[in-house]
Image: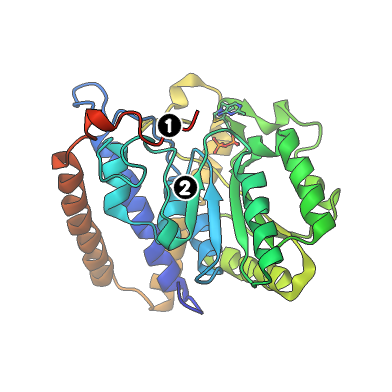
C-alpha cells in the first residue's frame, strides 16, 4: 500500500482481482469440469472498485475483516495469492490450512484478519479491533466490509451505536448490491436508502458511484482522515451490482429474480471497463500496456493454480488441530 494511488494503479489492482476471479470461475467445478475446488465461491465481479479504492486509502498497520464475498478484499489488502488459491483447493498450505475454503480467507501479515460467512459478523469484530487500537493509543483503524443484507442484522445497530459512543477508529464499508441472495432490497426495506442506518447512530456517511474507483478512493481517503483525526467511526456506502450468481461461477439470470432493465443498466457501469475507457481517453493507458498487464496476471495465475492443484491435502492426523470446541 503506497501513500497516493493514481487511477492507473487502482485500475491495475481491479484488473488483477477480476483476472483472479475469472480464472476461478473458469476452473470451478460444474458440468464437464472436475470438482477440485470443493468450497462454495461468492464472486465479486462487478464490485471490485470498492475493495480497490477503500484498501488503497488505508495504510500499513491498518486491518480489515470481510464477509463470504471476500476475494476482492483479501487481494486488495495484499493477501497472498498462492495461499488463497491453495485454500480454495483445500490444501495444507492454504491460508487457513485448507480447513476454511473461499469464505475463510485471512492473511495476518497483510492486515487482512479474517473473512466470516455469518452475515454481519465482520462488523463487531472490526469494532473489537478498533477498541483494542484505541486502548493501545495507536492510530490504526480497522475496516469491516459487508453487504446490504448485513445491515439488517441487529449486530450492525449494536456495533454502530457502541462505535459512535466510544469514538472507535472503525471504517464500516457497505457494498449495497441490492440483493440478499435472491431478495431485492425493495422487498426487504420500506426505505431503500441504507445511509439512514448510519445517520441514526451518528456515523458520518461517505458515498461514491460504484463504477468510479477514483471517486471511491477519494471518499475513502476522507473517511480515513475523519477517523484518524480522532472523530470516531465512518461509514462508506456504495451502490453496486454483482455480475454473477449469488454463489458460484455462473450467471443466473434464467431464475428471473433480477429486473432485466436494472441488470443491463448496471452491467453498463462496470468499474473495470469504466476506468479502462477513461485511462485510454486520457492517454494514460495503451492497448499494448493492457495486453502486457493481462499477460502478466495470466502467468502469475497459471503458476499459482498449478501450485495449488499439485499441493498436498492436510495430513489426516492433524484433523483435530485448530478445533477449539
Ligand atoms: C446470519 C446469517 N444468516 C443467513 C445466512 C445465509 N446467507 C448467506 S449469504 C446471504 C446474503 C447476504 O447478503 P449481503 O449481506 O447483502 O451480501 P451479498 O451476498 O449480497 O454480497 C445470506 C442470507 C448467513 N450466512 N448468515
Q: CA distance from mark 1 to mark 2?
A: 36 Å
The 10 Å Cα crowd at callout 2, few under 14, some 14 to 19, many 20 or more, is many
Name the secondary structure under disc 2.
loop
The 10 Å Cα crowd at callout 1, few under 14, some 14 to 19, many 20 or more, is few
Whether residue 251 is situated above or below residue 136 in the rendered picture: above
Ligand 1 lies under 8 Å from the Cβ of mark 1: no
Whether residue 13 is situated above or below residue 114 in the rendered picture: below
The residue positioned 58% from the left and 49% from the top of the image is: 145
Whether residue 104 is situated above or below residue 19 in the rendered picture: above
Q: Is residue 120 left or right of residue 59?
A: right
Task: Decide if residue 277 is in sight here.
Answer: no
Quick check: marks 1 and 2 in contact, CB under 8 Å? Answer: no
Ligand 1 lies under 8 Å from the Cβ of mark 2: no
Q: Position of residue 238 (x, y in %)?
A: 63, 52
Q: Which mark is residue 135?
A: none
Q: Looking at the image, which is closer to me, 190 or 277?
A: 190
Q: Looking at the image, which is closer to me, 125 or 22?
A: 125
Q: Position of residue 280 (x, y in %)?
A: 38, 71
Name the secondary structure under disc 1.
loop
Give the quarter of the figure containing the N terminus. bottom left
The residue positioned 66% from the left and 67% from the top of the image is: 136
The residue positioned 73% from the left and 70% from the top of the image is: 226
Give the foreground label among 1 and 2.
1
Which residue is under mark 2? 46
Q: Is residue 260 left or right of residue 189?
A: left
Which residue is under mark 1? 323
Amino acid at each position: 500500500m503506497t501513500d497516493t494511488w493514481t487511477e492507473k494503479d487502482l485500475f491495475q489492482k481491479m484488473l488483477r482481482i477480476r483476472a483472479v476471479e475469472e480464472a476461478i470461475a473458469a476452473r470451478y467445478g460444474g458440468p464437464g469440469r472436475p470438482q477440485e475446488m470443493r468450497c462454495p465461491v461468492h464472486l465479486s465481479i462487478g464490485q471490485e472498485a470498492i475493495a480497490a479504492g477503500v484498501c488503497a486509502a488505508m495504510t500499513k498497520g491498518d486491518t480489515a475483516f470481510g464477509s463470504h464475498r471476500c476475494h476482492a478484499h483479501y487481494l486488495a489488502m495484499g493477501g497472498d495469492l498462492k495461499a488463497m488459491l491453495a485454500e480454495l483447493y483445500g490444501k495444507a498450505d492454504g491460508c487457513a490450512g485448507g480447513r476454511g475454503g473461499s469464505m475463510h480467507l485471512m492473511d495476518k501479515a497483510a492486515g487482512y484478519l479474517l473473512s466470516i460467512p455469518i452475515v454481519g459478523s465482520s462488523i463487531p469484530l472490526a469494532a473489537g479491533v478498533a477498541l483494542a487500537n484505541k486502548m493501545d493509543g495507536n492510530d490504526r483503524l480497522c475496516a469491516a466490509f459487508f453487504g446490504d443484507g448485513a445491515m439488517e442484522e441487529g449486530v450492525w445497530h449494536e456495533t454502530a451505536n457502541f462505535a459512535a459512543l466510544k469514538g472507535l477508529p472503525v471504517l464500516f464499508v457497505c457494498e449495497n448490491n441490492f440483493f440478499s441472495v435472491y431478495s431485492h432490497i425493495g422487498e426487504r426495506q420500506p426505505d431503500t436508502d441504507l445511509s439512514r442506518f448510519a445517520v441514526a447512530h451518528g456515523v458520518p456517511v461517505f458515498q461514491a458511484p460504484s463504477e468510479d474507483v477514483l471517486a471511491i478512493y477519494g471518499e475513502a481517503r476522507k473517511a480515513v482522515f475523519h477517523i484518524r483525526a480522532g472523530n470516531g467511526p465512518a461509514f462508506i456506502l456504495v451502490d453496486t451490482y454483482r455480475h454473477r450468481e449469488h454463489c458460484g461461477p455462473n450467471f443466473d439470470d434464467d431464475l428471473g429474480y433480477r429486473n432485466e432493465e436494472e441488470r443491463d443498466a448496471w452491467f453498463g457501469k462496470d468499474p473495470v471497463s469504466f476506468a479502462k475507457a477513461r485511462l485510454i481517453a486520457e492517454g494514460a493507458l495503451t492497448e499494448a500496456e493492457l495486453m502486457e498487464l493481462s499477460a502478466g496476471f495470466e502467468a502469475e495465475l497459471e503458476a499459482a493454480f498449478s501450485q495449488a492443484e499439485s499441493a498436498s491435502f492436510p495430513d489426516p492426523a492433524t484433523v483435530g488441530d485448530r478445533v477449539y470446541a
